[in-house]
Image (cartoon, rainbow, N blue to C red):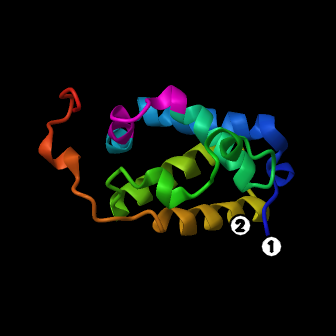
Amino acid sequence: MCIALDDIGGEERLRDLVRSFYDRMESDPDVYELHRLHFRGHGLDHTRQAQFEFLSGFLGGRAYYRERFGHMDLREIHAHEPIRLADVEMWLATFDAALQEQGMAGPVVERFRGTLARAAHRLINDLPDWRAETTPGASPV
């Protein structure tokens, strides 16, 4: 059974969830490695918006991300970043914490979590991990 955007409360509820997720990423030292993955990209402000746009389309709402970028291929979107199992687990745990913060629970949310977990695990790759070559707090390349 597919999860629909309306099942989780619509666009505003999704915006709140994405905000909670990225607020955690910016403020929780335990997820610093996830935050670092965005240093070399467009930054978290861009990512916050892109995440909302992607998830809206992913959940059957307006496909903002596809409208802007022409596709919604998760592997292509993340192809430039080293993603390890630890990164996926950290991302999912951070997303779970954001779901809890937003009071989102129940069977629909569990299905959503399962779908996200399957998608996230498909992103694991073997690209060289530049994070191992830099020291925490150093300016990224």
Q: Left or right: 128 with respect to 23?
A: left
Residue wearing tag 1 = 1
Give the class, few, some or many, for how many residues have Cα within 10 Å of label 1's Cα (few <14, many ≥20).
few
Q: Amino acid at mark 1?
A: Met
Any mark on residue 111, and which? 2
Secondary element under disc 1, as helix, strand or loop, is loop
**Residue 107, percent from left and from top:** 77, 65
Q: Residues within 10 Å of mark 2 (few under 14, many from 20)?
A: some
Region of the chain picked out in magenta, as a range: 35-46
**Which of 28/65 is in front?**
65
Q: Quadrant of residue 72?
A: bottom right
Q: Residue at x 21, y 26 (%)?
A: 139
Relative to 1, 58 lies left or right: left
Residues at circles 1 and 2 in contact by the CB criterion of under 8 Å: yes
Residue 45 position, x and y percent, is 52, 26
- Whole-number angstrom distance, CA of label 1 to CA of label 2: 8 Å
Extreme residue in the bottom direction: 1
> Which residue: 65% across, 38% down?
68
Q: Is residue 68 visible?
A: yes
